[in-house]
Image (tube, rainbow, N blue to C red):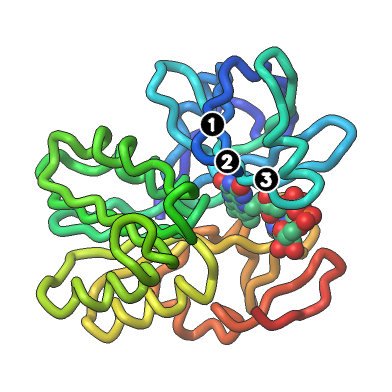
Amino acid sequence: MIWLESQRNTNSVKVVTIEKVIDETPTVRTLVFSDEFLSKVLPGQFAMVWIPGVNELPMSVMISQEKSKAAFTVRKHGLASTALYSVKPGDQIGVRGPYGNSFTIKQGKLLLVGGGTGLVPLMRLATFLQKTDDVTVIMGSKTKQEVFFEGLANDILKQNKHVVLVVTEDGTYGESGLVTDAMQRLLKENTFDAVYTCGPEKMMRKIVQFAAEKKIYVEASIERMMKCGMGLCGSCCFGEVLACKDGTVFDGQYLLTNKEFGYTHRSKSGIMENY
Ligand SMILES: Cc1cc2nc3c(=O)[nH]c(=O)nc-3n(C[C@H](O)[C@H](O)[C@H](O)COP(=O)(O)OP(=O)(O)OC[C@H]3O[C@@H](n4cnc5c(N)ncnc54)[C@H](O)[C@@H]3O)c2cc1C
Ligand code: FES
């Protein structure tokens, strides 16, 4: 895995001002702000985002197509993510990081499979790929109005041979079904040099298994409950490792030995729960 050489103290909070808010879907927004440092993070790295008076949340660092700008793409869910989703241009948030390792950049025929906001680190990854790579992106969402980043993925990959395949669970747009169905179908006729995935852990477990059965190199970015983001509190335990410090990106060979992967996770109070 590659690590970023950092000059800024990654553990101090920097206050940034939101400059632009982009509505991606009725529940997802991208927040753009100026931050030279976060604009250059490696694909898969995340930041801890402080929403004043509410909470601090881990967020994958999204790309911004404007120089020196960084972004987060947030889906409104509970209290903290809804507060972050609701910020307006001119509002301030705190950021610290980047944290975590990053995807290993492979070359050749590559497959990126993402569900929901799991697409965020995969869009960043797409900007790091060689123009000679042949890239297939499978993006999943529940329904047509929750599809986002299709245009962005096509734009990032416009100089590559590429396919962006949208899958909706209710069949209202693109292919009907789950991203795992689309991947299984693709694997019948194609092989890939590497597969990258981020999204719900049960989905990622299947993707890692499918890739491993075909002996394809695979990496997944794991989302666990995170409080410190820097390896101190232990809330992100993932088997014997810490998702924030040892990951968030792990390869298939490791993941298939981790008994928690896709089966159990820890709640906010640390209690083990089934997915
Ligand atoms: C490395 C990483 C990157 C992430 N990137 C994104 C992203 O780009 N966009 C996005 O919308 N979301 C992202 N998330 C998820 C996000 O951090 C929140 O989990 C989610 O927005 C819900 O938070 P909430 O407090 O509003 O919801 P709540 O209703 O309070 O919690 C709902 C569920 O969210 C999860 N959750 C809540 N707080 C945390 C936390 N501190 N750490 C991890 N999970 C938590 C738990 O599973 C919880 O049960 C990421 C999580 C991780 C770990
Ligand atoms: S979030 Fe605290 S150790 Fe990982």
- The front one of 85 and 61 is 85
Provide the residue designation for mark 1: 23
Split into 4 quadrants, where in the image is the C terminus? bottom right
Residue, x 80% and y 59% (percent of image)? 233
- The front one of 199 and 8 is 199
**Mark 1 or mark 3, earlier in chain:** 1
Instruction: Point out which mark residue 180 bears.
Output: none
- On screen, residue 213 versus residue 134, left or right, reads right
Provide the residue designation for mark 2: 26
Q: Is residue 217 above or below residue 137?
A: below
Residue 113 image offset from top left, x and y in percent: 35, 61
Q: Secondary structure at mark 3?
A: loop
**Mark 2 or mark 3, earlier in chain:** 2
The amino acid type, in three-letter code, at marker 3 is Lys
Instruction: Point out which mark residue 76 bears.
Output: 3
Q: CA distance from mark 2 to mark 3?
A: 9 Å
Labelled pair 2, 3 in contact (Cβ < 8 Å): no
Residue, x 70% and y 13% (percent of image)? 90
- The front one of 140 and 48 is 140
Q: Secondary structure at mark 2?
A: loop
Residue 139 image offset from top left, x and y in percent: 36, 56
Q: Is residue 258 above or below residue 268?
A: below
Quadrant of residue 256 within the rendered picture: bottom left
Q: CA distance from mark 2 to mark 1?
A: 7 Å
Labelled pair 2, 1 in contact (Cβ < 8 Å): yes
Query: Disc 1 beta carbon < 8 A from ligand 1?
Result: no
Q: CA distance from mark 1 to mark 3?
A: 12 Å
Q: Secondary structure at mark 1?
A: strand
Q: Is residue 90 above or below residue 87?
A: above
Q: Say which of marks 2 and 3 sits in front.
A: 2
Residue, x 69% and y 70% (percent of image)? 237
Query: Disc 3 beta carbon < 8 A from ligand 1?
Result: yes
